[in-house]
Image (cartoon, coloured by chain):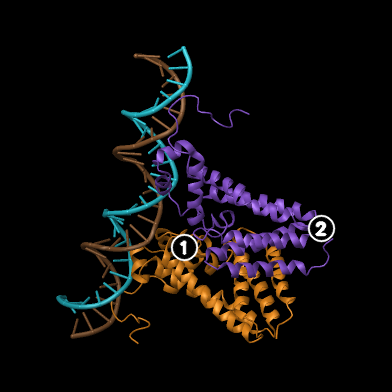
Chain colours: A orange, B purple, C cyan, D brown
Amino acid sequence: MTDTKKEHTRGRPRCFDRSAAVKTALSLFRQKGYDGVGVAELSQALGIKPPSLYAAFGNKHGLFVEAVRTYAAEEGKFIGEAVGGANSLEEAVTNLLIAAAEAFCRCKDQPGCLILDGTRNCMDSNARATTEEMRQETKTFLKKAFSRHSSRDTGEMADYVLIAMTGLSGAARQGEKREVLLGAARRFAAAILQEEDSQ
Amino acid sequence: MTDTKKEHTRGRPRCFDRSAAVKTALSLFRQKGYDGVGVAELSQALGIKPPSLYAAFGNKHGLFVEAVRTYAAEEGKFIGEAVGGANSLEEAVTNLLIAAAEAFCRCKDQPGCLILDGTRNCMDSNARATTEEMRQETKTFLKKAFSRHSSRDTGEMADYVLIAMTGLSGAARQGEKREVLLGAARRFAAAILQEEDSQ
DNA sequence: CTTTTTTTGTATCGGTCACTAAATAACTCC
DNA sequence: GGAGTTATTTAGTGACCGATACAAAAAAAG
């Protein structure tokens, strides 16, 4: 209602590209997790000094929130695509898990999922809440999407898929190769394919 | 070959129970992960001062190594039991995954698996190497155990089971309830049950 | 121009990290 | 007893953590 985007009417203009800074920060968070990246490291990677970072994003967590939103909007597209283009629950789950396995090992310097693993063992409760909120949103989305294809309890199906994705993300972070992840994803999906009470 | 256990022949005797200290440290590491527990916190929980900890264990990583060994010897027994008592590959996998789901949510204040999640996003490469070494040993053990029941490539089966367990551990750490974990474990096992070329 | 607003860099804050030098305390051996 | 050995404590190291006070710099508004 007030000002969603400051148009910079007066005062010294910002010396760095704000959205590019978010993407750089996102890359670092994906590599090392929230606790693994320091404000000093972030500032240096962004080519600015810590006070500029705090002026632009409030604090480290504020920058993380924007990075997570960018991540969900860009790297998370495969979720909607895999589920939306499916004609059955089994196809949706299969597409999703295979796409997740592919996505989690695409960038080899930052494997796994930021939402599922970016704040694991993290001491900052705000950062954990940020990823957990996104995880719950994903679960809700999957539950609704699955319900288009089935009258079953799609909540437990969403739980299952997210736990499988957690395994794939964790394995990717451990360095497991693409073929191994894909093999596991196919087995995870096969467990659903054999269930026959789909409609 | 030299001295595996110092019998304390001379000098001031230790004022604390060394193996009890390892168990206390293990509990903290399970709760917070390696990076989440500090030497000061460990010392206070053990009722000693940091120099006593360093005198007894060398450094934080030395204490972690002993904690991991204790964990593997006690909390990891279910792996051998689940696999050893099985009469088929399918039964071994099913027993193992269900037992893992139970184990990962048994202690509600320290859910998940120390080996699989204790050093995630950890900055200490030695600590990561310690858990990764244990993970590889487990994979090798499972591969051999599975090969007693199948002529298939049991290496990829061990990979699959470990990735599934990684998902269960991560979900347990996120606070997923026992029933959810057990449901996912049954589905993970069902994917193997349907594969028919077991023997 | 001056005033106002916003961003910038310099320098630093208090706190925590893993770790340790040095002195003392408690034990065995002689 | 004294000598030797080991564990203990006190006190503190330098490095890093997230976050900031302050003033100079750079823009728009009057």
Q: Is residue B192 visible?
A: yes
Q: Secondary structure at mark 1?
A: loop
The answer to whether residue A21 is seen in the rendering is no
What x and y, as percent, mark residue C9?
Answer: 32, 61
Q: CA distance from mark 1 to mark 2?
A: 43 Å
What subunit carries mark 2? B
Horizontal arrangement in the rendering, residue A148 relative to residue B9 (left or right): right
Residue A141 placement (x, y as % from top left): 56, 81
Residue at (72% x, 54% y) in the render: B142
Quadrant assignment for the N terminus of chain A:
bottom left
The amino acid type found where label 1 is placed reads Tyr
Within 10 Å of disc 2 (Cα), the crowding (few <14, some 14-19, many 20+) is some
Name the quadrant containing residue B79.
Answer: bottom right
For mark 1, what is the residue?
A: A34
State whether residue B152 is above or below residue A101: above
Residue under pointer 2? B150
Q: Which of the pair A138/B111 is nearer the observer?
A: B111
